[in-house]
Amino acid sequence: MSATEIDFYELLECERTADDKTLKSAYRRLAMKWHPDKNPGDKEAETRFKMISVAYDCLKDPQKRAAYDRYGHAAFQNGGPGGGQGGADFGDIGDIFESIFGQAFGGGGRQQARRGADLRYDMEISLEEAFHGKKTEIEIEVSAACEPCHGSGAEPGTGARRCTMCGGHGKVRAQQGFFVVERTCPTCHGRGEVIEKPCRVCRGEGRVDKPQTLEVDIPPGVDSGTRIRLSGKGEAGPFGAPPGDLYIFLHVKRHAVFEREGTTLVTRVPITFTTAALGGDIEIPGIDGERLAVDIPAGIQSGKQLRKRGAGMPVLQGRGRGDMVIEISVETPTKLSARQKELLRELQETETGDECPGSKGFFERIKSVWAGLAE
Ligand SMILES: [Zn+2]
Ligand SMILES: [Zn+2]
């Protein structure tokens, strides 16, 4: 086991869905149990006490917990996901974490096999799916622990014997000048044992490629760039070591009507110039499938933005929804009948210029410019 494999929830003996109260009481109970005062001189108890403190420190903070749920321990490493960009600020929790967990399981003893690799799976979803969330299944071919040998790599019925090269320590020592250097045993690759007879199915590897169907639960509010972690669904570890994680990378497809800016949905709505002048009610589709009534005030101009509160995208792992912004563009008619043209001419004859103050003001300003040019 290494620092990267200890699950915070397992440390606190809680479900991943545990609420704050449950976490807190679990932490109190375990902190009491492993407290150095209660276990004087017990190094392991002290380490465990430190670890549960770090785990609880992370999970009690909603922001850190959300990041941990999404990225696992990667949330604390190398400044967080994406090199710190967009990730929560964890201060030095990463360092503390590494030093305690690394110390506890990295040094001394037999070296454990490395865990399996993390995998990436890209998934495209529609904006509607991002809105509602989605439960879906994916099929992937992933290396899984070999069944006949249970991942050990040894032919069933045969065993493994202690490595004679390192005496089962997984490490060999060599003198280099003044120093004694410890290296991973080249014979058993650190496992401390060697297989007598390799498994025929996996040829001694302990894992085989296998198609798997996995359930993916996409929460409402995800966006392009959101990653969903399926813990332990990555590649199987070599020789029965723990598996890696599978990360689902989400991509939200462009929508025909809506543009998304965070939780805000923007839609451009062309209206007729008569509706713009007289005002009126129009209906537009909402992302939730409802019809949204929009009240157009008389005299609205192109570019004006109307806002529908709470008609945007849901907040990921939060409450409420963003807004919908409706940007109005006034469309000048291009296909008029003879009768319509006649009516418009009639309208034109009644114009005094005061109907459109913007236009009137502009031409008055031009007049003064022309007058200046004439001097
Ligand atoms: Zn060895
Ligand atoms: Zn096998």
Image (tube, helix red, strand yellow):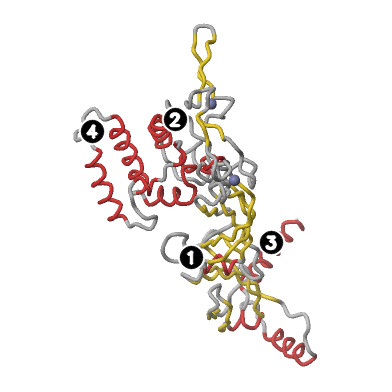
The extreme right residue here reads: 338
Amino acid on which the number 1 mark rests in the picture: Pro
Amino acid on which the number 4 mark rests in the picture: Pro
Q: Which mark is residue 368?
A: 3
Q: Which mark is residue 36?
A: 4
Q: Nearer the viewer, mark 4 or mark 3?
A: 4
The verdict on label 1 being within 8 Å of ligand 2 is no
Q: Give the mark, 2 or 1, whose residue is nearer the N terminus.
A: 2
Amino acid on which the number 2 mark rests in the picture: Gly
Mark 3 and mark 1: span between their CA atoms? 53 Å
On screen, residue 361 versus residue 21, left or right, reads right
Mark 4 and mark 3: span between their CA atoms? 88 Å
Mark 2 and mark 1: span between their CA atoms? 43 Å
In the rendered view of the protein, which quadrant contains the C terminus? bottom right
Q: Give the mark, 3 or 1, whose residue is nearer the N terminus.
A: 1
Q: Give the mark, 4 or 2, whose residue is nearer the N terminus.
A: 4
**Residue 129 % position (x, y):** 57, 68
Contact, CB < 8 Å: mark 2 with mark 3?
no
Residue 210 seen: yes
In the rendered view of the protein, which quadrant contains the N terminus? top left
Seen from the viewer's position, the closer of residues 231 and 258 is: 231
Give the class, few, some or many, for how many residues have Cα within 10 Å of label 4's Cα (few <14, many ≥20): some
- Residue that numbered label 1 is attached to: 314
Q: Which mark is residue 106?
A: 2
Amino acid on which the number 3 mark rests in the picture: Ser
Q: Which mark is residue 347?
A: none
Relative vertical location of residue 218 with respect to residue 154 in this rendering, above or below: below
Residue 294 seen: no
Q: Give the mark, 4 or 3, whose residue is nearer the N terminus.
A: 4
Seen from the viewer's position, the closer of residues 91 and 306 is: 91
